[in-house]
Amino acid sequence: MSALSELLAKIAVVRKEKIDGASGDDDLAARLDLLASRDPDLPDWRESIADLMRLVGADSSYGVRKALAIELGYPEERILTQGSAEMNRWLTEELKKHL
């Protein structure tokens, strides 16, 4: 399974699972906000790809984020020259298109 498929599968579970305080009509953002509010680390899933991945129970390691970025079209050479912070910002915005 690709990195994107695995992450989207985890997100699909969040969309469907029963979450105390969430109604069945809540959109994904509302559900993620609710989960984030209950996390003592207060993840900023809207701005951090790693926080989003952790929030939905996905592996947020550098290797997985790098594979996900490459899968979505981020040039590997840019990772080497511009570092992971730039990749993470790009990845956060790119993933929003898939939600």
Image: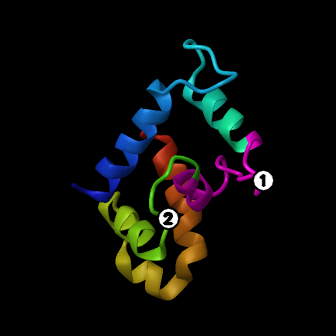
Q: Which residue occupies 54% across, 82% down?
A: 82
Q: Which residue occupies 44% across, 67% down?
A: 65
The disc label shown at residue 60, or none: 2
Q: Is residue 74 visible?
A: no
On whether residue 94 falls in the magenta region, the answer is: no
The crowd level at tag 1 (other Cα within 10 Å; few <14, some 14-19, many 20+) is few
User: Which residues lie in the magenta part?
Assistant: 37-54
Q: CA distance from mark 2 to mark 1?
A: 18 Å
Residue 93 placement (x, y as % from top left): 55, 51
Q: Which residue occupies 71% across, 53% down?
A: 43
Residue 38 placement (x, y as % from top left): 74, 42
Tell me the kind of residue under disc 2. Answer: Ser
Secondary element at image label 2 = loop
- In the picture, measured across the screen, residue 27 lies left or right of residue 8, that is right
The disc label shown at residue 5, or none: none
Tell me the kind of residue under disc 1. Answer: Pro
Which SS type dominates the magenta stretch? loop
| Mark 1 lies on residue | 40
- In the picture, measured across the screen, residue 93 lies left or right of residue 98, that is right
Q: Is residue 36 above or below residue 63?
A: above
- Residue 84 lies in quadrant: bottom right
Disc 2 + disc 1, Cβ < 8 Å: no
Secondary element at image label 1 = loop
Residue 87 placement (x, y as % from top left): 52, 69
